[in-house]
Each structure stands twice: as structure tokens, then as C-alpha cells.
Image: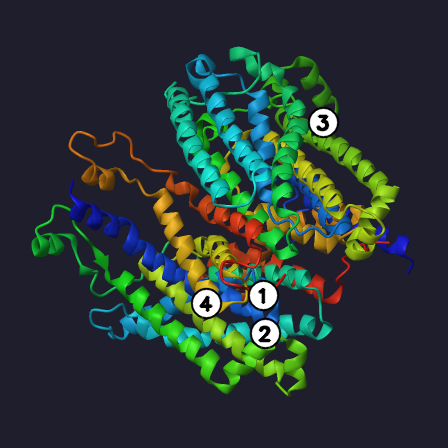
Amino acid sequence: MDILNALVALANYVIVPGLAYGAQLALGALGVTLIYGILRFSNFAHGDTMAFGTAMTIILTNGLLALGITFGPLPTALLALPFAIMLTCVLVLVTDRVVYRFYRAQKADPVILVIVSMGVMFIMNGIVRFTIGVRDIQFADGERFIMSVPTFKKLTGLQEGLAIKTTQGITVVVAMIAVALLFWFLNKTRTGKSMRAFSDNEDLALLSGINPEKVVMVTWMIVAALATTAGVLYGLDKSFKAFTYFQLLLPIFASAVVGGLGNPLGAIGGGFVIAFSEVTITYAFKKVIGYMAPGGWEPDSLVQLLSTDYKFAVSFAILIIVLLFKPTGLFKGQSV
Amino acid sequence: MTLTMRNTLLVVAVAALYILEGSTTFWIFSGSWDSALKMISFALIGSIMALGVNLQWGFAGLFNIGIMGFVALGGLATVLISMPPTPGAWSAGGWQILLGLALGAATIIGAVFLFRSLPKGRKRSALILALLIGGFFVFRAVFDGGVAAVEAINPAATGYLGGLNWGGDNYKANGWLTIVAWPVGGLLAAGAAWIIGKTALGLRSDYLAIATLGIAEIIIAVMKNEDWLGRGVKNVVGLPRPVPYEADLQVDPSFIERAASLGLDPVTASTLYTKIGYVVLFTIVLLILLWLAQRALQSPWGRMMRAIRDNEVAAEAMGKNVTARHLQIFILGSAICGIAGAMMTTLDGQLTPGTYQPLRFTFLIWVMVIVGGSGNNFGSILGGFLIWWLWVMVEPLGQWIAQVTTAGFDPDHWFRIRMEDASAHFRLFTMGLVLLLVLRFSPKGLMPER
């Protein structure tokens, strides 16, 4: 029995990566859920919006590095992030003006808007490919670890090491700041309140003099900021590749639906539920059980419930179970 | 301009695009019948997929974006039918795998049974959970052993169960088996559609979309990882063909003679012959499916479907079982996609799970349906041919645009390099643009529903 080592192994392989991934999914799901709440459709272009924001960040980061500007121990991408958010804002606002507004005026069926967002997805994917190509890009610089395995071992004298990457720390901190700002905005400011009113009951909100175009514009800007941040954090933590961002759409949707579409708190909860289930179910528990089991009882197999290639299956299974038994999501979302 | 005239003009225009590809080297056309025939084969397959999606979306308003999964299942069927069984694989672990799968299925059925028969409460939840967890470990114990045994058999060449072809080493002689695999692919896809439909069809339209998107990714994940089934990412190559091999034709004296009488050399003649063979086979399948779809559309069943699509509440009030009808048409449409998937794998001659991508196999088909005109079967086929032509020709078109815009620059000017680099990525952008333009300015498509 060696509970401490088992805990450290679990923290190293499950808890820390799960927290970082959960924060990334939560930010992505917040964007999906806001669009759903205000504009009332599932935005399939969200993954590619994230990819566009990240691509802009990478280009700006390269520019800053060429000028010799760095952010000390932190990744330079964080300096470029605000400017990339502005560019993404411009892109989504232009998209809204040119594409979505027409269908809003027509009061088109939500499913038509979903198909339209498929078209937007194609175009954004094309733009990302034009600007940065399809390669796998690493753009994290600065200090690599907050806590590296040898340091941890020296500090604690334990056999098992714990590594916390800088990007993982940054992910959690930035996500917390972004969420705090979002909730402050939604709950305290006049525009935020009008957004919530619009989401609750469009007709009543219009009657009380809320300008729908302004609400929609602010929503897109917030979504652009969230999507870019989520994309950059994910890219820093892993790497940037346009196609992976498209594939992120599934866990992000799963998070938003599991938490309850249209409910920002639910998106955050859903993000962590999905992230931790993915990581736990695809982790090989051999080491942890090895430490916990009495001598001689160590398992031979990897004790891995599913191979890592099935992580989509995990988010999907949770999605289906929640939809079947609690269609409005774990945190009450908008009614069907 | 009357509707018939407009439609005829559209068909003539699209046909001209393919004829130009085959006959002239002008502009972006390659002037090779070989490439034109290949494009036609793929366009036929794309049209069949579009026909299936049109059944679901155009007739019933079901939003399915998991087409890729059904197409891949169809491809799997080709391997399972037309490849020879790996010697010794079944006795080594094949039956054990089947037993494991049966145990897994029994666990799920048992859980559903418990859920239905026991009263709601903590006792039920605990029992179901215990059954699922216990069943999972039993399943893994039996299943994993079988998989390891099968995958250990000559992993570099086989390492999978193989198919049903009894030809042994001479399995390529039974090429007609691939044609048998097409309806089997449809059945496989229909089975998957039944499971998905049973769980997801009661949901709202965008939930169904997300559910189908997910299931398609899972089907691909299974095909990539379960090596015992279809060799995973190691691919199955050398599938038998329903048409003769070029090499056999080139040594056949009567064929050489006939080629000579047409003024062709044997090599060109043999490639054209096989390509035309595929086109004829695929055209027959397309015509049969089109006839069936047209009959279905005009029958009382088709009218009921459209009534449900246009007003679900009213149809339900008239006593129509909406969920059951939706399940029916979801299965039918998916089966058609499965058939097309099997045909495509036959044409490729290999199963490569790594190449299935949602943009190419799901969203492109959607562009075909929307551009062609949702609700109109002929429109789907027109859309299939037009969009496939564009999908292929966008690349030469991009190069042409790059050439024209950069004509005045030095070969190593940054703008020129940038444009030449970008021309390869022209495809998705154009598809999105076409989709958005059609949705905006002609939302009913080129051939609107009548």
C-alpha cells in the first residue's frame, strides 16, 4: 500500500490534464451555449472559429518574436491574444452581417441556420488553410514547466513524479479569469442583463425596448473572445492543427448539451464532466492500482477501460445517456 | 422559360462539363477520357449518396450528418464479403470474438430489460450498474483473448478474420462477390441506422445532428482500431474487382483485335474498358435506386412523409406514427449511403479507414443535396454530378487563378509563392461559398421540389 504515490500518479496523469482539458472545453462550450441562447442555433462553425483565432495568434506571435518581444517565462502567444481576439471579432461580425443577419430577418428555421453554419464552417476552414496551412504547429515558448518531475521528486522524496506544465497552469488561470469576467458582464452590466433577458424571452425583451441587433453584436464579440482564448489555450497545451479543431466540435457540443444548452454554468460543468470522463476512462490504471494493491497483487494488464482512440466514444456515450434521461441537461438548460 | 426547358438545359450543361473534360485540353480541362470516366464513376457514387440523404432530408426533414459512418460501414462490408478468410483465424479466436460480442450485447439487452421491468428506484439503478460493470469485464475478458489470437496471425499481411470468399489464394476470380457486397453494405448501414434511430430520433433536430456526427466518428474509430475486423489503419488492399483486370485484357488476343479494329492500342483500350465497366455497373444501381425513390415519392407513403415533414403536429393528429415513420426513412436513407460506400470501396480496390473525413464524406454530400434541390431526386443526381465536378476541378481552377493573378511577378516573388501555395486549399472555401450562395439566392436549389 502506498497511497501517496498512488495519489501523485493519479494527479499526474488524470487530475492535472483533466483540469486543463476541462477548462479548454468549458470555454469552447460557453461560446456554443451563448450562440444557442441568443441566436438559437447550434453553431457548427465554432471549431473553425477557434482555429481562425488560434491561427491569427500564431501569426501575431511570430511577428512579436521577430521584433524580439517575448513575455518572459510565459508564452508570447498570451501577448498576441488580445489582438487576435480583435481580428476574430471582425471576422465573426462580418460573417454575421453578410450571412446570418439575412436569415434572422426572415425568422428562418433553426435547422436552416445550422446548414448555413456548415457553409460558414467550410469557408472559415478554407481561410485558415490559406493563411497558415494544414501543418501541425507548436507555438508555446517560455518556461516549459511550473513543476517538473525531478524537482517534485527532490522536494517530496516520493517515487512517483508530478509534472505541471506552464501551459496547464495558464489554461486554468486564464479560464478562471475569462469565466469571472463573463459572469460579471452577464449579471452586473446593463448589456449583459439585456442579453439574458433576450435569451429568456425574445418577445418580452423586444417589447421592453432592447435592441436585438446590439445584443447579437455583443454576443458575437464575446463568442469570438471565448473561442480564440479556448483555441489558443488548447493549442498551447497540445499543438495547433486545423483538422483537430474541427474534431473538437464533438466534445464541445457534448459539454454544452450535457450541461444544458443555453446555460453558461452548465457549459462549464459539462466541460469538466466530459473532460474527466474522457481522461479517466482512457487512462491505464495499472500504476495506481499497483501502488494501492497489497504486495504481489499488482495487475498484469494495463487496466485501461477503453483505448485512447475511443475518447470520442466516451463523450458521445455521456451525451446520449444525458439526452435520453435528462434532455435539458444536468444543469437546467433551455426547454426543448 | 418553362420548368422542363430549364431542367433540360441544366442537365445538358452539366453533361457538357464532363464531355469537355474528356475531349478538350482547353482552359482547365485535361482532355483525357480516362480522367473523365473516373470522375463520372465517383460522381455516380456521390449521386447515390445524395439520393439517400435527400430521402432523409428532402422527404422527411431529418438532419443526418453522420453519412461518413454509413459509407464506411458499406466499405467494411466489401471486405467482409469479398476477401478470403484468413486461414486458421476463425479457429484461433474468431468464435471467441463472436462470443465476446454476444456477451456484450446480452449485457446491454439485459440492462434495458431490467430498466423496463423493475420499478423506478435505487434498487433498479444499483442492479443495472452492477450488471453493466460486471458484463463489461466479462466481455473484455472473453473478447480480448480472441482479438489477441486473431491479430497474432501473420500481422504484416493479414492479422484479421477476413471475409467469406471461398476462392482461397485464387480469390480474385470471384470478383462478382463485390457486387453481392453492395446490398450487404446497405444492410450493415441499415442495422447501424436502426440502433441510432431507436435512441436518437425522438430528439430535436440539432440533437439528432450532433448524435449522428458523433456516431460517425465512433464508427471510424472502431474501423481504425479493431484490427481483427478490417486490419484497421493497416488497410486491406487487393480487393477483387467485378470488372476484368487491365493486365488480363492486354494479353487476351480477341480483345487486342477488337481494340485494333477501333483504332486503339491495347493499353488505352483496356483502361477505358474497365472504367466503362464500372460506369455501367454504377449507372444500373443508380437507375434502380432512382426508380425506387421516385415510386416511393409518388406513393401514398411518400405523400405521408411530406405531410409529416411539413407539419408534424397535424400529421400526428391524423393518426400517423411520426417516430416510426422517421425511423423507417432514416434506415432506408442510411442503407443507400451504405450501398454507395460499398461501391466506392470496390472502385478503390482497398479499404483505408484513415481516409474517411467528414468534410469529404458528410458535408460534401450535403452540398450536393442542397445545391441540387432538396426534395427532388433528379436534383440530387444533378447536384451530385455538378458538385463532384467542382470538387475535382477546383484544384486546376485554383492553379489557373494563381497563374493569371501572378503572371506579372517574378517566380520567387512572395505573392506568387503565396498564391501557388494557396491554390491547393481552394477546395473547401469554394464549397462553402457555393453552399452559402445557393442557400441565400436560390434556397430551393437548382431543381426545386414540385
Task: Classify 10 Å Cα crowding around label 2: few (below 14), some (14-19), many (20 and above).
Answer: many
Residue at horizontal 70 percent and vertical 30 percent from the top: B276
- The mark nearer the N terminus, 2 or 4, is 2
Residue type beneath disc 1? Gln
Element type at marker 4? helix
Element type at marker 2? helix
Q: Is residue A280 above or below residue A216?
A: above
Residue type beneath disc 2? Ser
Q: What residue is shown with label 2? A: A199
- The mark nearer the N terminus, 1 or 2, is 2
Give the image location of residue A11, x and y in percent: 25, 52
Same chain? Circles 1 and 3: no
Subunit of mark 3? B
Query: For this rendering, which residue is in front, B228 or B404?
Result: B228
Q: Which mark is residue A334?
A: 1
Give the image location of residue A144, x and y in percent: 21, 60
Q: What residue is shown with label 4? A: A265
Q: Are marks 1 and 2 in contact (CB under 8 Å)?
A: yes
Q: Nearer the viewer, mark 3 or mark 4?
A: 4
Query: For this rendering, which residue is in front, A264 or A217?
Result: A264
Q: What residue is shown with label 3? A: B263
Element type at marker 3? loop
**Residue at mark 1 to residue at mark 2: CA–CA distance:** 9 Å
> Can residue B336 be seen from the camera position used here?
yes
In the rendered structure, the answer to whether residue B222 lies left or right of residue A17 reads right
Residue at horizontal 51 percent and vertical 16 percent from the top: B85
Residue type beneath disc 3? Gly
**Residue at mark 1 to residue at mark 4: CA–CA distance:** 12 Å
